[in-house]
Image (cartoon, coloured by chain):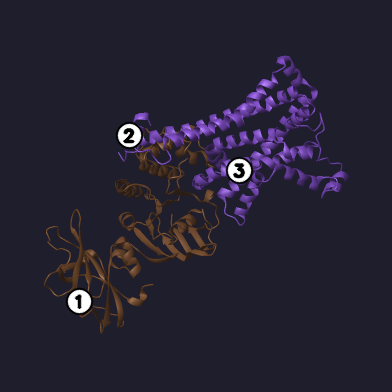
Chain colours: A purple, B brown
């Protein structure tokens, strides 16, 4: 709305100039202090002792190990959680069964629970004094303070990410498409890959991107179950904390910059994916309007 | 192919959607399942398709018991109310889908030829490269039909095929569907809650209420001999007048209505179409007062109240000068009379 017309017409509800200005100003200031400033600090501090020092920190064996461990964790946790998310969304949206709402709640629990609670819980289940601890110990299976524990904790925290993206979409899409495909003779797999997947792929990718970002950045749950062993069970976030406590500020910031860069890439991917999805919809809509007047020739 | 439903039952949780329905559909017939929402008509259609399993009873395709054949192998063409076209595929790809996934292997040329043939059939030649979102609702419905026909189904099932379209497109598509049916001769069942659509299109109409068949017959049979007050009121605008049967004669208030009524004495309900009522100033009929007059394109619709408080609706010619407040008489020319207790 231009300035002139806004002066002439009475403002819409909630569109008074002072409301608009103060709201936008408030959000901008808070955003700058809370989000932008820390990111800038990370970037500046990471390179405060020059590129060489930055490269040396990244190249330190412990840092490299932390990066590797984080990537491996993501490589295991994200695909499994993607499968889990698709399966859960499929089950919840396409089938009717007893306990469906309950399953929905279960899937969402990790969202509302503090990750550290999950970490402690795993300690009680798999720890030496825990439920399965003695059994696992007898067979010399190490879950806690090792990769399996880190992966399990990361998976717990990120379990809902993919499902949460898919459920509303798949609910809106209903079952008609799958029913149509099946009535035309398609098998279950064929229906999934030719009909369901193409219609959920952007939401799915978005869910995977978010899931990955969270897996790589997870701190609380992992810090409990990993045992924080430097060069062995330290993921990148844990490594950053260690460096910080060792008064290696530059190192901490350098490592943090990797995570921050990952976050920025995630956001860019997210925006790109959203554009992709929305753009298709808009193009289709205008095209549909153009021919909507056509009827039987 | 002849379809036979034998004592079919379906229950959702505690809701009995379909209760003991038996129905024969002749080969090549165009049959309408007509009923209000919740009457079980869509459930019956989905059970014939195999999209729902029956909780009891059998469904035969010809001599084969198809009750437990999964939808994938049942060989039906199903047209969904909201088309259910695959949005990420072109019209060509949509129509070719059934041919591609079929267990019968076809080569590309065969599939392309069949797709073009079907596009011609539904009069959408040249639009094959468009996406569903780029065509109108009526066109989408025709693509859905072409896609359903692509697999040479034994039976064609349509769920409220014109429900989401506007009135003009509906009427055109209806006639067109009839033509296609006559051309292909495929057994077709469609579901509708629109009595006009059912009567317009079908060879035979099956009227359902609360999961049961109330009446079935040709459009002529169900229109001329409705077997219940429900069918009478469901098929079109209906006036209802309470009366009393005495010695084979029917009275409204003190006025005798000129119909033979063969059943027992007692309170009755007289059902008459607006066209079966006539407004007379002098002639003795049922005394009534005009409450409102609604002017319409072709006639004037009069709403009158009888002394007993029944509302009557009927039409008078455009040149009539009836106005609200006028007193006169309503003569019932034609009516169906049912015992009052029969009205559920």
* Chain where mark 1 sits: B
Nearest the viewer among A141 and B127 is: A141
Secondary structure of the residue carrying tag 2 is helix
Nearest the viewer among B105 and B325 is: B325
Q: Residues within 10 Å of mark 2 (few under 14, many from 20)?
A: few
Per the image, the residue denoted by label 3 is A163
Residue at position x 64%, y 36% in the image: A211
Are the residues under marks 3 and 2 on the same chain?
A: yes
Nearest the viewer among B344 and A186 is: B344
* Camera-side mark, 1 or 2: 2
* Chain where mark 2 sits: A
Per the image, the residue denoted by label 2 is A8
Find residue A139 and report its image quarter.
top right
Q: Is A247 left or right of A98, judged from the image as shown?
A: right
Secondary structure of the residue carrying tag 1 is loop
Image location of residue B283, percent across then percent down:
12, 73
């Amino acid at each position: 709305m231009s300035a002139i017309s806004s002066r002439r017409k009475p403002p819409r509800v909630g569109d008074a100039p002072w409301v608009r200005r103060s709201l936008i100003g408030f959000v901008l200031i808070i955003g700058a202090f809370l989000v932008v400033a820390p990111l800038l600090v990370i970037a500046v501090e990471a390179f405060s002792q020059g590129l060489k020092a930055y490269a040396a920190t990244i190249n330190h064996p412990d840092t490299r190990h932390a990066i590797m461990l984080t990537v491996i964790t993501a490589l295991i946790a994200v695909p499994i959680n993607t499968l889990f998310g698709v399966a859960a969304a499929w089950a919840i949206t396409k089938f009717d069964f007893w306990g469906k709402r309950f399953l929905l709640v279960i899937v969402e629990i990790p969202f509302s629970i503090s990750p550290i609670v999950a970490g402690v819980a795993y300690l009680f289940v798999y720890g030496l004094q825990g439920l399965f601890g003695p059994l696992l110990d007898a067979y010399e299976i190490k879950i806690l303070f090792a990769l399996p524990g880190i992966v399990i904790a990361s998976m717990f925290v990120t379990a809902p990410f993919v499902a949460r993206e898919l459920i509303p979409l798949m609910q809106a899409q209903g079952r008609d498409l799958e029913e149509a495909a099946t009535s035309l003779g398609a098998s279950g797999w064929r229906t999934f890959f030719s009909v369901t997947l193409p219609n959920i792929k952007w939401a799915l990718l978005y869910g995977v991107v978010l899931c990955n970002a969270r897996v790589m950045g997870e701190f609380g749950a992992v810090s409990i179950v990993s045992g924080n062993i430097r060069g062995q069970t330290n993921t990148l976030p844990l490594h950053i904390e260690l460096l910080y406590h060792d008064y290696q500020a530059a190192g901490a910031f350098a490592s943090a910059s990797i995570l921050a860069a990952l976050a920025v890439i995630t956001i860019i991917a997210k925006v790109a994916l959203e554009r992709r999805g929305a753009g298709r919809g808009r193009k289709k809509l205008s095209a549909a309007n153009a021919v909507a007047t056509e009827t039987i020739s | 192919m002849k379809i036979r439903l034998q004592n079919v039952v379906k229950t959702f949780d505690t809701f009995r959607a379909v209760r003991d329905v038996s129905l024969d559909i002749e080969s090549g017939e165009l049959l309408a399942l007509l009923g209000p929402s919740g009457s079980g008509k869509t459930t019956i259609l989905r059970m014939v398709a195999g999209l729902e399993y029956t909780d009891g009873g059998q469904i035969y395709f010809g001599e084969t018991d198809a009750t437990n054949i999964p939808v994938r192998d049942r060989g039906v063409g199903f047209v969904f109310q909201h088309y259910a076209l695959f949005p990420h595929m072109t019209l060509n790809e949509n129509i070719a889908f059934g041919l591609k996934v079929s267990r019968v292997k076809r080569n590309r040329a065969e599939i392309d030829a069949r797709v073009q043939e079907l596009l011609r059939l539904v009069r959408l030649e040249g639009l094959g490269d468009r996406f569903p979102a780029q065509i109108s609702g009526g066109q989408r419905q025709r693509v859905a039909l072409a896609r359903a026909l692509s697999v040479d189904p034994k039976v064609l099932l349509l769920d409220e095929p014109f429900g989401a379209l506007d009135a003009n497109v509906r009427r055109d598509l209806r006639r067109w569907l009839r033509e296609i049916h006559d051309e292909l001769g495929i057994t077709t069942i469609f579901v509708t809650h629109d009595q006009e659509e059912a009567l317009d299109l079908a060879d035979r109409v099956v009227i359902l209420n609360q999961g049961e068949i109330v009446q079935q017959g040709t459009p002529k049979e169900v229109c001329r001999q409705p077997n219940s007050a429900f069918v009478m009121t469901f098929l079109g605008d209906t006036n209802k007048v309470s009366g009393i049967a005495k010695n084979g004669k029917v009275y409204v208030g003190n006025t005798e209505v000129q119909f033979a009524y063969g059943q027992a004495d007692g309170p009755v309900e007289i059902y008459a179409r607006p066209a079966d009522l006539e407004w007379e100033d002098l002639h003795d009929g049922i005394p009534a007062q005009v409450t409102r007059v609604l002017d319409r394109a072709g006639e004037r619709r009069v709403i009158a109240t009888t002394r007993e408080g029944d509302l009557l609706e009927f039409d008078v010619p455009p040149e009539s000068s009836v106005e609200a407040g006028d007193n006169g008489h309503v003569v019932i020319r034609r009516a169906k009379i049912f015992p009052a207790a029969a009205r559920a």
